[in-house]
Image (spheres, grey):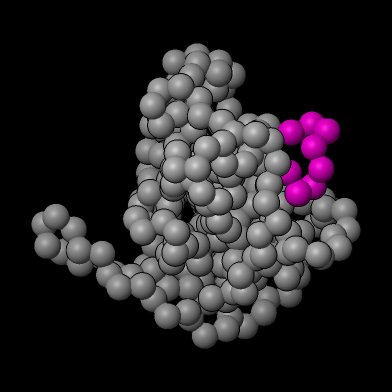
Amino acid sequence: MGGRNARDRGLHRRRGSRVGPALALVVAVGLAAGGAYLARRGATDLLATAGGPVPAAVPARPAATPTPPVVTAAGRATPAITYPARGTGAFRTATALGAVAGRGGRLLRYRVAVEGGIARLDVERFGREVGAILADPRGWTGGGEWRLQRVGPADPADFTVLLTTPVTRGRLCADPTDHYTSCRNGDQVVINVARWVRGVPQFPDLGRYRQYLLNHEVGHRLGRGHERCPRAGGPAPVMEQQTLGLHGCTPNPWPRPDGALHTGPPGQYDDPVPAED
């Protein structure tokens, strides 16, 4: 991503908006002094900016309408995830250490954390879901260029996958007007829980949309910019902004849907960002 502009680094913007420089974000979980604390508590506040105080807690807004519960193959209903517009700003980090995924290339380690206020979502289960997506051979670890490993709160990491409420997404992505999309900002891959729970209309399968969402934002962390639809009727590149539109392509959640890296022309469409839902 070196040399690309802010729109192409995973920061999604509204059409016609003027955006200042991205805010510098600091995650303190890697400090030696905080490592022992994290190991004991598994939580941290990721909203502190360099040299500034942690913002005061803001009362959470009413929870959004939950999605219908998911019924498992065994017939047991999984309680629907609920969330407020604004979470607590504190994050609980998954503790399990995952296996190294990938058969070659540079190793990057990542943490997985969930913001306080998101209810009926177990951070360890979310961590396993993220790990399964990123370890899939159709993903970024399938080509021999990258290896990925999930680590715990006290371990050094190259990036963090954060599941956040919509307002916190706006803060961490340096774009407080956008409560709809997700982004990558620095070493933070910010997944908006609204999209994780609700998906988007052009993806009828929520599971496939979650795969796309994570692979797209992690792709930015791996240095890839936005791409356009290469052929009408064919699968979209994973780096196309499929959250906002398909432009003739069909939904595709994987970088390597058929084993080979599937790409499109560099660039992006001037799609409007929907209002928060």
Q: Residue at x 85, y 60 (%)?
A: 19
Q: Name the residue at 75% across, 63% down.
A: 15
Q: Is residue 251 within the magenta segment?
A: no
30 horizontally vs 248: left or right: right
Q: Is residue 145 left or right of residue 68?
A: right
Please tell me whether residue 179 is drawn above or below residue 31 in the rendered image: below
Q: Residue at x 73, y 59 (%)?
A: 13
Looking at the picture, how far across and down is residue 7, in whole percent?
76, 49
Q: Quadrant of the N terminus?
A: top right
Q: Which residues are magenta?
A: 1-9
Magenta stretch holds residue 6: yes
At a point 38% along the width and 44% down the height, the residue shown is: 128
Residue 2's spot in the image, x, y percent? 79, 31
Answer whether residue 234 is visible to the viewer in this image.
yes
Q: Nearer the viewer, residue 91 or 236?
A: 236
Q: Is residue 175 above or below residue 233?
A: below
> Where the C terminus falls, by quadrant?
bottom right
Residue 272 drawn at (x, y percent): 67, 65
Extreme-left residue of the structure: 74
Q: Of 258 and 143, which appears nearest the observer? A: 258
Could you say where residue 225 lies in the image, as x and y percent from the top left?
68, 37
Q: Is residue 34 visible to the viewer in this orientation of the structure?
A: no
Query: Left or right: where does residue 75 sit relative to residue 224?
Result: left
Quarter residue 89 falls in: bottom right
Residue furthest bottom as drawn: 62
Q: Nearer the viewer, residue 256 or 249?
A: 249
